[in-house]
Amino acid sequence: MSTLILLRHGESTWNLENRFTGWHDVDLTERGVIEAQRGGCQLAEAGLWPDVVHTSLLKRAIRTAELALHACGRHWIPVQRSWRLNERHYGDLQGKNKAETLAAFGEEQYLIWRRSYDVAPPAVALDSPHHPSHDVRYDALPPDVLPATECLADVLSRMLPYWADAIAADLRAGRVTMVVAHGNSLRALVMHLDGLTRQQAVELNIPTGLPMRYELDDRLHVVNSAYLDPAAAASAAELVKNQGNK
């Protein structure tokens, strides 16, 4: 039996401002710091001790991992980071307020851009500061893998190789493995783990700062899964669902 822990980063400054964040590298809010620390305390209370952690290359996930690990006394464990765990790139929507986008384009278009499985928002221009080709952390990547926009299907496609090569390898080695990432990269991973349909994945909402535990068999098939605090997760997921209505 293998244990996998999923944790979405704590509230970020652009979560608070109700903006499409994507690959833009914003920090945690004070509340986000508290959420990350609370997540680590929940791990300790549950007796869940990560042996290794995987994060994206974005500050909000990196800081969440650090704060959670300090809170449960596992700050010393190995950390691996990959762009493949980054949030979905929202293209030209990045930085835009969700409520204003909803008002400007209408609910149908807004929901297609925000939640559709296979429809990406308008692409960001190559000369835009939001294009990842202008970010030094992606300099070593081939230009053709850098997204100008993504849908959830794109996130799933670029996340799965990292799952197979890195995360699954740690699980098969018997390590309690924690993944600290983002709403969409974790949605893609849950879709893969739980065998969700496209519609189920679209309707899935992952709350910030609340650890989810998976128990997997020798073939890494799900035996059971649950949030450590199911009631808080259900309430927080409803808030995520209603973003844009603020």
Image (tube, rainbow, N blue to C red):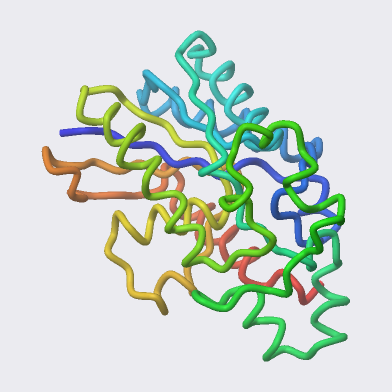
Which residue is drawn at the image coordinates 86% and 56% (left, top)? 128
Between 200 and 212, which is closer to the camera in this rendering?
Answer: 200
Q: Position of residue 104 (x, y in %)?
A: 87, 86
- State the image quarter where residue 116 is shown: bottom right
Q: Is residue 151 above or below residue 222?
A: below
Which residue is drawn at the image coordinates 46% and 46% (left, top)? 229
Q: Is residue 244 above or below residue 172?
A: below
Which residue is drawn at the image coordinates 40% and 52% (left, top)? 189
- State the image quarter where residue 62 is shown: top right
Which residue is drawn at the image coordinates 82% and 72% (left, top)? 246
Q: How many marks?
A: 0
- State the image quarter where residue 52 is shown: top left
Q: Is residue 17 left or right of residue 141?
A: right
Q: Position of residue 130 (x, y in %)?
A: 81, 52
Quadrant holding the N terminus: top left
Q: Which residue of the protein is positioned furthest toward the left in this rendering?
A: 218
Q: Is residue 241 left or right of residue 126?
A: left
Q: Position of residue 110 (x, y in %)?
A: 71, 82
Between 227 and 95, which is closer to the camera in this rendering?
Answer: 95
Between 101 and 29, which is closer to the camera in this rendering?
Answer: 101
Q: Position of residue 24 (x, y in %)?
A: 77, 47
Q: Is residue 120 left or right of residue 169?
A: right
Q: Is residue 118 above or below residue 32?
A: below
